Image: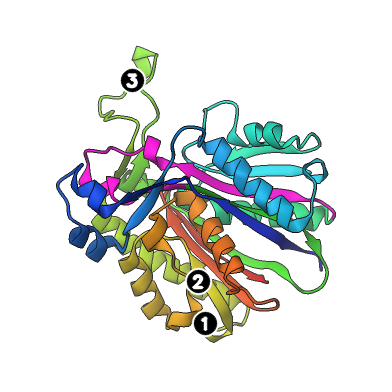
Amino acid sequence: MTKAVILGTGSCLPERTLTNADLEQMVETSDEWITSRTGIRNRRIAGKNEQNYQLATRAARRALAVTGVDAEELDLIIVATISSHMIMPSTACFVQAELGAVNAFAYDINAACAGFTYGLDLASNYIQNRPDMKILLIGAETLSARVNWEDRNTCVLFGDGAGAVILTGSNDGRGVFGSSLHADGKLWNLLCMDSPESLNPELRRDDWQGAHIRMNGVDIFKHAVRLMEDAVTSLLRKHDLTINDIGLMIPHQANIRILKNLKERLGLPEDKIFINLSQYGNTSAASIPIALDEAHRLGRLVRGDIVLLCTFGGGLTWGSLLMRW
């Protein structure tokens, strides 16, 4: 059976690093407070010529270079993001123009931090129907443009960056072979971000607080650990696997306490989980593809191993995905 296999990866991080010491000068916080509660020490912040689509394009070029695929060979470009360069056109269309991917159709998806995993499942389904397709999937965020820099509970968490993969069909046993994706819109207000205020006065909301991220951290923590655990265990059970069959788990890099709790509840050994949270913070939809590219370059992904992705984000959206590398 044809499966969607990742041919190569790429990533792009902004040049500027914002440290916990820098944040101490901006809001009432401390390095100890941030590190102990989140595990984050640094995050990258976009500057001039580092717009969302520009970071996405650079990550894509690196993935194309690794695979030897030419931009004109691409059939589809999907960008997962909640911080797109413009509401219209999509970031994917900007990337398509920058790359010269003249034969690709392009669109964005918004599933918050779960966006890349949703996109990987989507790409997998395209490829099952058209095995010869070459798909560029990107997670890209400039969350620094969507953060309230006076709110110490959220501004310490988020960073900017982009990660990309190139996918096509394969019959050699490798590739995506299972997913468990979920959403619960009733809990939207636990983690949300408003759009700009309506220009139609009849549609303006009385509770509009600004076009920035808002989060109930305590409730998000409770839901994230439980729901990701459920998504992982149910998916493993469906495919007659146990956690011992996993070569490497790459989770969404949100908060070290969430990751430690998840690891303990799953019974996953330390050497089978990839964490780079301390250097980049929470980059939402870019989190997993940045980690995937870093793990690949560090030799942590072994051909034939089963790789587990799991994620959780606003919506609420969450899920897990299995692939053989």
Residue that numbered label 3 is attached to: 204
Report x, y in % for residue 172: 81, 73
Q: Are marks 3 and 2 in contact (CB under 8 Å)?
A: no
Q: Quadrant of the N terminus?
A: bottom right
Residue that numbered label 1 is attached to: 243
Q: Are marks 1 and 2 in contact (CB under 8 Å)?
A: yes
- Does residue 24 lie above or below 212 as drawn? below
- Does residue 95 lie above or below 277 as drawn? above
Residue type, numbered disc 2: Val
Report x, y in % for residue 140: 53, 45
Q: Quadrant of the C terminus?
A: bottom right
Secondary element under disc 2, as helix, strand or loop, is: helix
Q: Please give the count of numbered marks on the rendered protein.
A: 3
Residue type, numbered disc 1: Ile
Q: Residue at x 45, y 84 (%)?
A: 269
Mark 1 and mark 3: Cα distance apart in space: 48 Å
Residue that numbered label 2 is attached to: 232
Report x, y in % for residue 207: 25, 29
Residue lying at the far bottom in this picture: please name it: 244
- Does residue 151 lie above or below 293 as drawn? above
Q: Residue at x 43, y 71 (%)?
A: 229
Q: Nearer the viewer, residue 287 or 238?
A: 287
**Tag 2 or tag 1, which sits nearer the N-term?**
2
| Residue 281 falls left or right of residue 33 | right
Report x, y in % for residue 22: 25, 47
Which stretch appears magenta?
A: 132-160
Any magenta on residue 151?
Answer: yes
**Tag 3 or tag 1, which sits nearer the N-term?**
3
Q: Residue at x 34, y 73 (%)?
A: 261
Residue type, numbered disc 3: Arg
| Residue 6 falls left or right of residue 287 | right
